[in-house]
Amino acid sequence: MFRFLSGFGSYWILLGKVFSKPEKPSIYYRQTMKELVNLGLRSIGIVTIISFFMGAVITLQTAYNTENPIYPTYLIGLGARDSIILEFSSTIVALILAGKVGSNIASEIGTMRVTEQIDALELMGINSASYIILPKVVATVLFNPFLTLISIITGIMGGWIVGTSAGVITSQDYIYGIQYAFIPYYITYSLIKTVFFAFIITTVSAHQGYHVDGGSLEVGRASTRAVVYSSVTILLFNVILTQLLLS
Amino acid sequence: MIRAENISKTFGDRQVLTDVSALFEPGKTNLIIGKSGSGKTVFLKCLVGLLEVDEGKIYYDDVDFTSLDFRGRKELRKQMGMLFQGSALFDSMTVEENVRFPLDMFSSMSAAEKLERVNFCLERVKITDSNRLFPAELSGGMKKRVAIARAIVLKPRFLFCDEPNSGLDPKTSIVIDELIREITVELNMTTVVNTHDMNSVMENGEKIIFIEEGEKCWEGNRDEILKSDCRLLNDFIFANALARQLKDSSK
């Protein structure tokens, strides 16, 4: 319990340092652009591949579980659309990114800590927490909504291609289904969740990396903790945000 | 000038530094020596504020560093340069970007002026044609020299070196020692070097303090060290047969 409270306290102290005034905004802008590439653009591949196949599987699962003459087949498209928009593209993609981006952030910052690069920044009179973490937070909060949109589009396309190829639904029914009773707010809900999750992934992972004490073994442990803690926090906030945004 | 007064530091129950006082003068290479685990790195980190002291005061000229707030320390740190044990070069930056980094953060120079200053510092530490290389592509000695170039690029008044010779061969160690000594005189810096390299002690030891078990046991210079009666210092300095022969021949 004491360790949890101490970790929770140091997380907020770190956030205080991260969101203090940047020393030189132009340098921070340059760093943010680099992080957009590292953490954002380089995640497009994995998000696209996973979304395509998950969209396909969601469509097939929905089709096989609603094999009933009472249900119109366009409901398969509707079910796939809502599953992808409401949960898959925001929450599941966030969990995948917690593994990819979160471990990357924790190990990068942890290595900087054990090789004294963070000490070097501090000694130069630079707020190391802000210089290292703020550009990552800004980059993921700005870019992850685009990843979610990409995920929604490729997921729905995956469902359409595989669903029609497997013969579980006609192209016409699928397209009708994904348009049927569409609530645009679901997209907003998904994007709001993504922004929160991006913030959680980056700050929780950065906190684990920033407080590494020891050597490479500790960096590895911090990387694992970053994925576990950010995943659990995402799941917790998923419940809270769903209740707040959909009730 | 740096003045440390009665510095004490503990980690949990472990007393790492006890009542250590020292005066480090400008234009001189001041050495802190002691065996591994004696507390010299903790003392150096306390001097630069990377660790908070439990008791005691640290003055830079007449400014009480220990009582400065975050902003005050930040300003003073712009006058410090440090060479870390593992060089601490930024992995994601090239040699040129590493050395230019403090200029980017704290100077209003134009790009051309920055490049000129970077090249001057790199040439001063005898690194040429390596601007585009990354730290992973450099040898240990080159990394140290690039780190020195980065440390002096803003013309600091205080230079700190933590084990500058660790992991280097004897010849490269001498090059690094000479470089530190020359730059100290050139820029009239107050240089504090943490070392247990005896060659550095004999070459650079204009002022030496010896720390054992977190306490200052002896203070002097390279000439006095050979004639010292301090048993702990003698055990440390003359730990090997060659050093003992040197001492016997000096009598």
Image (cartoon, rainbow, N blue to C red):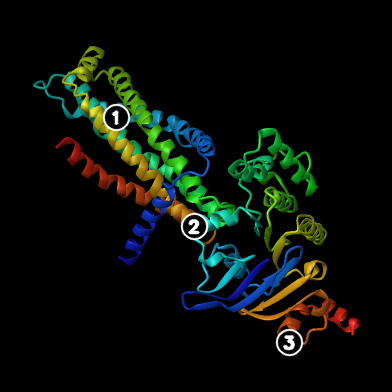
Q: Which mark is residue B74?
A: none
Please name whichever residue, B87 or B140, is drawn nearer the observer in this view of the structure. Answer: B87
Tag 2–tag 1 contact (CB < 8 Å): no
Identify the amino acid type marked 3.
Arg
Which numbered mark, 2 or 3, is in the foreground of this view?
2
Q: Position of residue A217 (x, y in %)?
A: 51, 58
Q: Is residue A226 left or right of residue B161?
A: left
Q: Which chain contains the residue that carries disc 2?
A: B
| Residue at disc 1, secondary structure | helix
The residue carrying pointer 2 sits among few (fewer than 14), some (14 to 19) or many (20 or more) residues within 10 Å by Cα, namely few
Q: Residue furthest left?
A: A70
Q: Which chain contains the residue that carries disc 1?
A: A
Q: Position of residue B200 (x, y in %)?
A: 78, 67
Identify the amino acid type marked 1.
Val
Residue drawn at x 30%, y 23% as measured from the top left: A156
The residue carrying pointer 1 sits among few (fewer than 14), some (14 to 19) or many (20 or more) residues within 10 Å by Cα, namely some
The residue carrying pointer 3 sits among few (fewer than 14), some (14 to 19) or many (20 or more) residues within 10 Å by Cα, namely few
Which numbered mark, 1 or 3, is in the foreground of this view?
3
Quadrant where the N terminus of chain B sits is bottom right
What residue is disc 2 on?
A: B70
Q: Is residue A226 left or right of residue B236?
A: left
Q: Is residue B29 above or below residue A89?
A: below
Residue under disc 2 on the same chain as residue under disc 1: no
What residue is disc 1 on?
A: A57
Distance CA(mark 2)–CA(mark 3): 42 Å
Tag 2–tag 3 contact (CB < 8 Å): no
Q: Which chain contains the residue that carries disc 3?
A: B
